[in-house]
Amino acid sequence: MMKYIMGIAASAALIYYTNNYTFRVKNLEISSDRIPEAFHGYRILHISDLHNTNYGTNNRRLIKAVEKIDPEVIFYTGDMIDKKTIAKSSFIHLASGLSKKYPSFYIYGNHEEELSREEKASLNAELDKAGIRFLENEKVLLKKNQEEISLYGLNLPNKFLRRTYDDQGELQLTREEIINRIGEPDHRFTILLSHNPLYFEAYAQYGADITFSGHVHGGMIRVPFAGGLLSPDRSFWPKYDKGHYAHRGRSLVVSPGIGGAKLRMLNPPMLYHVKLVHKSA
């Protein structure tokens, strides 16, 4: 009986360790006839919700994994830092080690939004020093062989991030609200970075061909055949918890995060490697 109990305890400890102190790489492909031909095979690394987690000294293991993937661009979709150690955080070590090789773009999550004005200035200075482009409700163009993709970074106030409901019920983000922040989308294939995946329908209505998000941590605890259990806004069974979702020809990629509170079960931290595939019309 004791051996049986010890075996169960050892198995539980192993599951807990692998779900909270190791990470995996998830490969995804997204195809569309709107993807420019020059971007066929384009490799995107999506990193979200590090929460200042370390994987080896100065995040050496994480850097090694990224270098093995060798992406063409990196998207950071928020909650990467611990506000108490911004300048010395594991994220800054990670970012400084990668941005010299790979163009990198960053948006805020709810943890960055909770920073003071001075703390945000400190973080932005560190991002700039590391060579990472912070997209503060703005657009940049990704270029390859004379073709272009529009990349938008949407930064929302905390009412759309931490608590996604108000006195009248569920808080809705509208297309008009998005336009007020980042403007009308142009004619190009459009990628949107936005921390909270809950508003996928609004992102699709706005015109984002692919939206990259994080925030939900895969639902923390994964229930087989049911999905993630808990969202950061304290609601159960979040609609979009991790993976690739499609809606009327638009896509949403939700990272389960690469760090965070050590409460994951059946839900290991992940890097998302997304390959774009040009599909002939």
Image (tube, grey):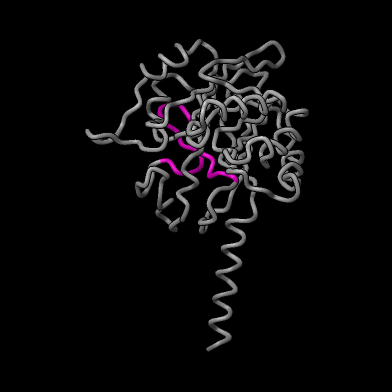
Is residue 62 at least partly visible in the picture?
yes
- The part of the chain drawn in magenta is 240-258
Residue 274 horizontal side relative to residue 254, left or right: right
Q: Position of residue 277 (x, y in %)?
A: 61, 28
Magenta stretch: residue 148 in it? no
Magenta stretch: residue 243 in it? yes
Residue found at x 53% / y 82%: 5
Q: Position of residue 246 (x, y in %)?
A: 45, 33
Q: Image quadrant for the C terminus?
A: top right
Seen from this angle, which residue lies furthest front? 118
Number of numbered discs overlaid on the protein picture: 0
Residue 114 horizontal side relative to residue 272, left or right: left
Measured along the vertical axis of the image, is residue 164 above or below residue 205?
below
Residue found at x 66% / y 30%: 74
Seen from this angle, which residue lies furthest left? 168
Residue 181 horizontal side relative to residue 76, left or right: left
Q: Nearer the viewer, residue 151 or 51?
A: 51
Residue found at x 37% / y 47%: 234
